[in-house]
Amino acid sequence: MAPRFEYAQAEEVRDSFARHGVRYLFIGKAGAILLGYPDTTQDADLFVEKTDANGAAVVRALRELSFELTESQAEEIGRGKDFVQLKSGPFDLDLVFAPDGIESFAHAWRRHVEVEGFPVCHPDDIIRSKEAANRVKDRESLPRLRAFRDYWLRRQ
Amino acid sequence: MGRSPGLAGQPPAPIIAAVHSDVPQEWQEEFEAAARRPLKTRLRYAFIHTYKPVLDDAGYRSFDSLAEYRTWCASELPDWLGYGPAV
């Protein structure tokens, strides 16, 4: 089992992805936590823009972060397979190239939030993706997440 | 707390209509307490790692669509993990 994702790992992702020019956003509960949502989660989800250049950049960044990718895995990430789970690296990471409930990366990027250099989806996009996913665990967390969204908006 | 770049320097309008339900006082207090903590501290307590059967048993998985992933979760993961569809 990979070590826990902590601030240092988040910084490594942020810095490596920036060095390689990766266009991405933190999404899911990890994104909400970056915005200030008090809760726990087990992994970090990244919404990655699906373009050839960005796919190649994310592969370079992941390898720099010591994720061991086979050539076929690198090829799948490079072409933006919709959902990729990485559990063999220094920490667990989920790459989402087409999250439920979000029209496009460009739409999400236009209203994204920067938190200490971390690019994060707007809370409304985080909520929409969870609503669309409609999993048991999402349904359970949505009322509190919506309440946090209202609190967060009042503070802006 | 972060700041949204918004459009033309203006704060973005809410995309989803605000929910004006009664927010439990406990949640409100938790939001305020979290807002007072530095990001580094928030992250230290936010990420936990417990073994999730099946899900954690492979180092790499990929799916052509999220629908395919959801179907896989529903058929392969134990219900109690909560990855199945809400009914």
Image: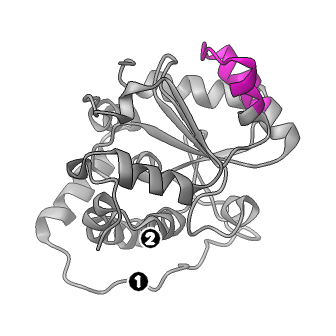
In this view, B28 is above or below A19: below
Q: Amino acid at mark 2?
A: Leu
Q: Main secondary structure of the magenta part?
A: helix
How far across and down, in percent of the image, does residue A46 sit? Answer: 57, 43
Residue A21 appears in the picture as rendered? no
In this view, A104 is above or below B14: above
Task: Say which element carries label 2.
Answer: helix
How far across and down, in percent of the image, does residue B81 sit? Answer: 25, 47
Chain bearing tag 1 is B
User: Which residues lie in the magenta part?
Assistant: A57-75
Q: Residue at x 37, y 35 (%)?
A: B55
What is the number of the mark on residue A127? Answer: none
Q: Closer to the camera, B60 or A18?
A: B60
Pointer 2: residues within 10 angstroms few (<14), some, or many (20+)?
A: some
Q: Are marks 2 and 1 on the same chain?
A: no
Quarter of the figure that contains the N terminus of chain A: top left
Which residue, given by chain and number where applicable, does mark 2 sit on? A153
Q: Amino acid at mark 1?
A: Ala
Q: Residue at x 28, y 50 (%)?
A: A38
Task: Say which element carries label 1.
Answer: loop
Q: Is residue B77 magenta?
A: no
Q: Residue at x 78, y 30 (%)?
A: A75
How far across and down, in percent of the image, does residue A132 sit? Answer: 48, 70
Which residue, given by chain and number where applicable, does mark 1 sit on? B18
Mark 2 and mark 1: Cα distance apart in space:
9 Å
Q: Is residue A140 left or right of residue B83?
A: left
Q: Which of the 4 image quadrants contains residue A98?
A: bottom right
Residue A150 appears in the picture as rendered? yes
Q: Which of the 4 image quadrants contains residue B45?
A: top left
Chain bearing tag 2 is A
